């Protein structure tokens, strides 16, 4: 077994013979073939080793790179990484197999909420300014208003990310990426350099993983490690708490609100404060590429899928949004309250299972503050009891004149739509673009948007 110093030395020497017949780097054991190098992160403990050995029983990579010494022969040529060198080693290998395109410029967006919207708007503005670009994030890889590849994470793993950048960036000028706190802490973007970045906000989420807001903040702050020395990190001026916490960095740049003259002509989607902040961040990111954006470009912008998707019919209004954190739910309900004043507001939402439980009562409390009627239902229960998840939410609602619990989400949506009266506004939060419900480990096909569109067609017909 060779260690990582030997590996890096071989690669830097440029002697391709040292790799033998290896033609490709991958992370998926199911892709293991004689010409493939598989990079495998081996967790601690005997059970993890046994799992790897079982997988190698049928999969035979030409070369296996493991993140720790297995202590036994694995039956195939094996390289072993030393402790804490994994991201650097993968970066070296990626440079060899998936070279970074020379003309491609990278932009990044981090934050609790708004990453997807900001990234998508930056992509649209950059293309409107005459550049070729693509985005990587929650909606997959997007180009020309379409998702062209899906991968299931906000930020893909290090090898997959480099594959995408090499492939889609070969003929592109820029790429804008969502950088999640998980990805930053796990160094999935190791070795990349962003021209500039945006940090949209910082509110509670992912405490099941980070444990504390302090640790969550520190994970997000790693974005500065990847921004070029002359690059800036844009933060909306309304995010004063975040700006104060970042006051020690000379790279932080406050983004001021749009003028009243420009705001009055914006589509309703952008009149909500949080979406205006997303638009401002996108604008500054694109300007960092040297693009001069004009107000006329704003009028052509389209919301990304599942973000403030709004339908109006027969005097009724329904909005589908991905809002799945306390801050995001408050933002959208506050915006709806301001936009549709004196109209009855119904909110339908749930919370994901096997995730941060502490945000559930907070979201219940927020719903009670803004909504005239609340329907608590399922989101992605995963392996948790959906009734328990709902109870956690209801505990935060307190006394409310109109609260309903409907465990099955499709049924809950049908109940909500059937009960709408003229002038009512229904907010369906939490799923947005998602076209499934995770029950256990199974994805059950379902879409809030499809359910809404189908109901409208039936009611009109």
Image (tube, rainbow, N blue to C red):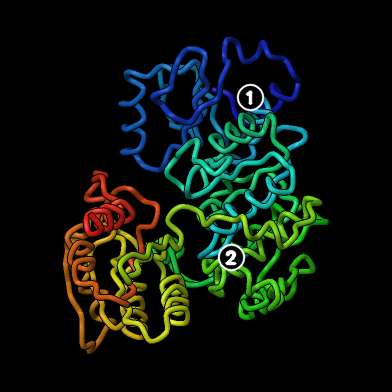
At mark 1, the secondary structure is helix
Give 321 or 180, whichever is nearer the viewer. 321
| Viewer-nearest of discs 2 and 1 | 1
Find residue 334 and report its horizontal and vertical position in percent: 45, 80
Quarter of the view holding residue 383 = bottom left
* Residue found at x 67% / y 10%: 17
Q: Is residue 425 left or right of residue 304?
A: left
Q: Residue tagged by mark 2?
A: 218
Find residue 258 and report its horizontal and vertical position in percent: 69, 73
Give 410 or 443, whichever is nearer the viewer. 410
The image quadrant where one finds the N terminus is top right
Give the mark nearer the N terminus: 2 vs 1: 1
Q: Residue tagged by mark 1?
A: 97
Find residue 135 and report its horizontal and vertical position in percent: 59, 45
Q: Is residue 414 left or right of residue 332?
A: left
Give 300 or 102, whichever is nearer the viewer. 300
The image quadrant where one finds the C terminus is bottom left
Tag 2 near tag 1, CB within 8 Å: no
In the image, is residue 121 above or below residue 263? above
Find residue 341 and report its horizontal and vertical position in percent: 42, 84
* Residue found at x 74% / y 73%: 248
Neighbourhood count class around disc 2 (C-alpha, 10 Å): few under 14, some 14–19, many 20 upward = some
In the image, is residue 306 above or below residue 135? below
* Residue found at x 69% / y 39%: 132
In the image, is residue 52 above or below residue 140? above
* Residue found at x 19% / y 64%: 412
Q: Is residue 405 left or right of residue 429?
A: left
Q: Is residue 3 left or right of residue 330?
A: right
């Amino acid at each position: 077994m060779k260690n990582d110093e030997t590996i890096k030395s071989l690669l830097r020497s440029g002697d391709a013979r040292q790799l033998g017949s290896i033609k490709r780097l991958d992370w998926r054991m199911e892709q293991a073939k004689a010409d493939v190098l598989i990079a495998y992160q081996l967790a601690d403990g005997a059970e993890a080793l046994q799992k790897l050995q079982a997988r190698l029983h049928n999969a035979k990579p030409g070369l296996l790179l493991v993140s720790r010494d297995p202590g036994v022969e694995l039956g195939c040529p094996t390289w072993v990484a030393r402790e804490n060198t994994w991201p650097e080693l993968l970066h070296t290998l990626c440079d060899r197999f998936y070279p970074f395109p020379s003309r491609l410029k990278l932009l990044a967006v981090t934050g609790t909420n708004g990453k997807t919207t900001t990234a998508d708007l930056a992509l649209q503005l950059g293309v409107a300014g005459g550049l070729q670009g693509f985005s990587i994030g929650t909606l997959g890889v997007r180009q020309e208003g379409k998702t062209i590849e899906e991968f299931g994470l906000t930020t893909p793993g290090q090898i997959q990310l480099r594959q995408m950048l090499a492939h889609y960036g070969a003929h592109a000028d820029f790429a804008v990426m969502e950088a999640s706190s998980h990805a930053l802490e796990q160094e999935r973007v190791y070795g990349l350099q962003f021209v500039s970045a945006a940090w949209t906000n910082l509110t509670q989420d992912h405490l099941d993983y980070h444990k504390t807001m302090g640790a969550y903040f520190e994970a997000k702050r790693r974005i500065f490690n990847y921004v070029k020395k002359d690059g800036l990190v844009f933060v909306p001026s309304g995010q004063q708490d975040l700006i104060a916490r970042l006051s020690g960095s000379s790279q932080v740049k406050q983004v001021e609100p749009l003028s009243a003259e420009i705001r009055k002509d914006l589509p309703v989607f952008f009149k909500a404060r949080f979406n205006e902040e997303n638009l401002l961040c996108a604008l500054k990111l694109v300007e960092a590429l040297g693009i001069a954006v004009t107000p006329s470009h704003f009028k052509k912008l389209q919301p990304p899928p599942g973000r403030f998707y709004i339908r109006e019919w027969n005097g009724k209004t329904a909005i589908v949004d991905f809002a799945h954190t306390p801050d995001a739910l408050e933002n959208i309900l506050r915006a709806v309250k301001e936009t549709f004043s004196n109209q009855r507001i119904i909110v339908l939402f749930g919370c994901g299972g096997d995730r941060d439980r502490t945000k559930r009562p907070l979201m219940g409390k927020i719903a009670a503050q803004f909504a005239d009627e609340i329907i608590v239902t399922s989101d992605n229960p995963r392996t948790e009891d959906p009734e328990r998840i709902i109870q956690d939410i209801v505990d935060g609602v307190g006394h409310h004149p109109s609260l309903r619990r409907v465990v099955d989400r499709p049924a809950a949506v049908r109940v909500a739509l059937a009960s709408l009266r003229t002038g009512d506004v229904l907010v369906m939060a939490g799923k947005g673009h998602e076209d499934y419900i995770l029950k256990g480990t199974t994805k059950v096909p379902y879409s809030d948007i499809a359910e809404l569109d189908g109901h409208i067609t039936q009611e009109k017909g």
